[in-house]
Each structure stands twice: as structure tokens, then as C-alpha cells.
Image: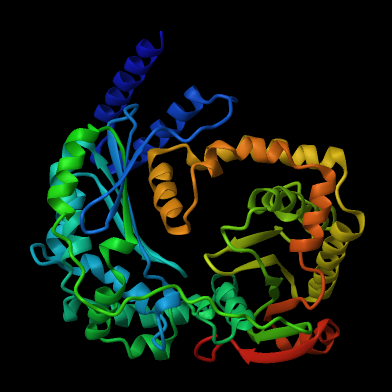
Amino acid sequence: MKNKTVITRKAWMHDCMATCSNQFRQSCIHVILLVLVLCSFSFAQFQLPEYEKYNLPNGLTIYLMEQHEVPFIYVSAIFSAGATKDGLKNGLAASTSESLVFGTKNYTKDQIEQIVDFNGAELNVSASLEYSTLNSYFLKDNKDALLPVIKEVIVNPVFPEDEFEKRKQRWLVELDQEKESPRSVIGSYFKKFIYDDDPYGNPVNGTKTSVSEISVNDLKNFYKIFYKPESSAIAIVGDFSSLKMKQKISDLFGTWNSEKSQSVTDIVSELPAHDKSRVLLVNKDNSHETTFYIGQYGITRSNPDYIPIQVINTILGGRFTSWLNAALRINSGLTYGAGSYFSPYKTSGTFIISSFTETSSTIEAIDMSLEVLDSLHSKGMDEETLNSAKNYMKGQFPLDYETSGDLASLLVKMFYYNISDAFINDFQKNVDELTVEKANEIIKIYFPKGNLQFVLIGKASELKGKVSKYGEVIEKEITDIGF
């Protein structure tokens, strides 16, 4: 019966694909994948599907996971080349990542785009604070056309100056446009405010000053130092034979050898504790509302209490019915949304309460946020509330890994953060084992209470005198270059 179901689903998918025009193919793909997931969803404990992990002689880590339900292949690659490696030229990691697809030894930018478009595929590159990634997906029958392109983008980029200069000019305009939307830039202001000159304070997209100073030689040097097979990983998930794929990957990537350059390791900074509360007030004269973050340092991704912390944060601000959203949106109507989250990094992390509201309601909204955070400490957890959050987490968790693309991305992040399979396979057990007593201990340890750091973007003339009660006020203009 199981085999019959799989065959029926595959036949149905092929029929759907045949009726989709090229223009709507990608939309059809996502709808089909979602329906297949819903059809096969089970409330049994979610387990990581079987996969093979091995290293090529050059040190490149490869993950292969066969998933034959749909005729697609997903590729994710990760490189230890994020904004924390920018040095004095913020935006260098992001510029290098984007420029990978601007031309290679054997393909021009136009040829790369034509091959990807002709085969109805996707090929995206991006940088984040700690790493850069490449993600692609395509029909399994098109692997011989797409895999060589992916190899070229990773192994043989040439960084053509004309293409980079055109992108840089657009980039500078985008940096101005971003500041028109406080919600787009408040994260960069917050990280810079709490991390100061530490690499974790680097803005991923850089500043107009720093981006203006980036040259093609900077890109080539950054690539040479940080794009190395021994510190990179590629995950391939989908409809293929692992035996054949191993040979293909060996042929494509086995000759990738990093040039001799300095060995680079992640710098672990000794971050100074914030010994007082402070307020960064970023003036946006034409604003009628205030966007704000309240937070502190958070946790690393390897923290042994990572899962219990996420369960508790679900109650505080991690879902629609969370305490923060209930107070600021549902009950008071002060905002369209409020929440909290931990952003864990390799050697650091942040905790943030975030929301936005009309200028006249700013103080009420911030006070209410602080009251909710305080109630987490003063009242703690009860059995009913904790069980609700645990059930919610267990229900949502499998949906984070419902597609082959999700699984490919998961595998390379497991590589980067050195996460074992137990994160997935023991997730439900770790959630179930969280008791009220343990939850209340975790609140005291990880959820900040004093010396909070505040970042507000809004009309400073109406806010300055009011927000001084939260701490020392530092003012900036949103029109100033940088953060």
C-alpha cells in the first residue's frame, strides 16, 4: 500500500507539472510540495532521514540524502565567510558572495543566468553575519546542466570588474532606500549598539562609506582566504542515486584546492558586560511611529539548554498567542505585532523584544513590554502554560524541515555549528523532559532582566524627554552614514 501511494503521488505530480506553463512552474512546485507534505504528515516523532556524510581528499564535507517522493534535487553549500570576517570593509562578505555569480572561468554572467532560466531552476547566493551560502534546486533530469554551473560558481569565480562596479552603484542606492524602512535597519543598529567594535556588530550589507571603498581585489583576496574546501560543506538532497552522485561530485569538486594563505579561525571575543541600561534614539523626522528593540546578549547555538529556551520564549513572544503579542496587540491594540526571539551565533548571540507603535503610544508600549518580561521572572511558569508551549513546539518543529530544500539547508548548518543528529532525533524527548522547575531556572539564567539595551527609531523630538527614564540616551540621525 505504501508503494502504491508513492507511485500515485509521483504520477499526480508529473501530471500537474505537465499542465503548468513555464511561467507558473515554480508556483506549481511549491503548491505540490506543500500538498505532498500535508498528505504524508504524521504525528509520530520526527526523525532526521538517513543520509551519508563524507569528506573529499581536499577536506570538503559532502552530505547526500536521497528523497525520491518528487523529481527534484536541492543543493545547499555553506562557507565560513560571513560579515564577522569583513575587517574594516563592512559589506565585503556580502559583496563577495553576490559576485560569485557574476562570471566564472568557463561561464559569463549571462550564460549562468540563461542556463538557470532555461532549466526552470533557481540559483541564489547570499551572506549573513557568520557565513555565506549558495542554494539551488532543479529537476533531477537537469542535473548534468546545473551541477557544473554550481561547481564553477563555487570553485572558479573571476569577479569581473564591470559587473561588480554596476552592482556596487545599485548597492549604494539600496543602502539609502533601506533607511526609509526602520524595520529593515533596526537590527543593524541594535547589533552595533550592543557589540560596538566587535565583529558581531558588523552590518552585513555594510555602509555607504565602506561599500564605496571595496574593490575587485578585495573580493578576490576575501575569496582566497575564506572560501576553502576544508571549511566548507555541500548538501545534496533529492531524487538521485547516491552511488552515481558521489562520483559526479568527486569529479566536479575533487580538484578544488585552496591557495596557500593565512589560516583563519573564528575569533572568540571577551565581550564586556553592559553595566547599565542605555537607549539609542535614532531620529527619523518624518516618522509617525516608533520601531523599537529591547534586549541584551543572548546564547550561542551550542548552548545545551537551546531547546528549553526556545520553548519558554514561545510563551513570552514566539507565537501569536504569546504574552507579548497578547498584551501589545490583542488586548491593547497598540501594535500589529510584538514578539521576542534569541538569535544564537557560534560564539555569541542576542535576545530581543521587538515591536512598533504610533509615536504617541511609544512609552506605553515599551512599559508594557517591560511589564511582560518582568512577569516572566516574577510569576514564572505553571504546568498548563508550559504544556501548551511544549505541544505547540512539537507541532511546529517538523514543518521547519518539510521540504528537501529545508533538509539541505539544515545539514550544512549542522556542519557549521557542529550540531549532531540528536538535535532533530531527540527534539521531542528534550521538549517533553522540560519541567516547570527547570523552566523557572532557565528563565533566571538566560532571560535578561537588568541593564537592558534599548534601540528606538522614530521622531526624536517627541521621544527624547520621555525615554530617558530607561537609561542613558545616545542620539543619532537615521540619515547619518552607518549605524
Farthest top residue in view: 1
Q: Is residue 122 above or below residue 178?
A: above
Where residue 433 sits, quadrant-wise, is: top right
Q: Quadrant of residue 45?
A: top right
- Quarter location, residue 113: bottom left
Point out the residue furthest to the right here: 378
- Location of residue 332 with respect to 68 vertically, above or below: below
Above or below for 354 versus 470: above
Tell me how the rendering is colored: rainbow
Q: Residue at x 70, y 72 (%)?
A: 296
Residue 29 location in percent, x, y?
Answer: 35, 36
- State left or right for residue 90 relative to residue 371: left
In-image side of 25 versus 433 (left or right): left
Query: Observer-nearest residue: 245 or 36?
Result: 245
Q: Position of residue 311 (x, y in %)?
A: 71, 47
**Picture residue at 43% right of the left edge, 58% below the top:** 416
Q: Looking at this rendering, what residue extends furthest in the front direction?
A: 57
**Left or right of 263 on screen, residue 453:** right
Asked whether residue 118 appears in the rendered view, the answer is: no
Image coordinates of residue 385 in percent, x first then y, are 83, 42
Q: How many marks?
A: 0
Q: Nearer the viewer, residue 24 or 210?
A: 210
Residue shown at 41% from the left, 85% from the top: 87
Q: Quadrant of the C terminus?
A: bottom right
Q: Is residue 432 left or right of residue 418?
A: right
Residue at (50%, 27%) from the top-left corner?
A: 38
Q: Is residue 283 visible?
A: yes
Residue 285, percent from left and from top = 65, 86
Q: Quadrant of the N terminus?
A: top left
Question: 396 and 346: which one is in front?
Answer: 346
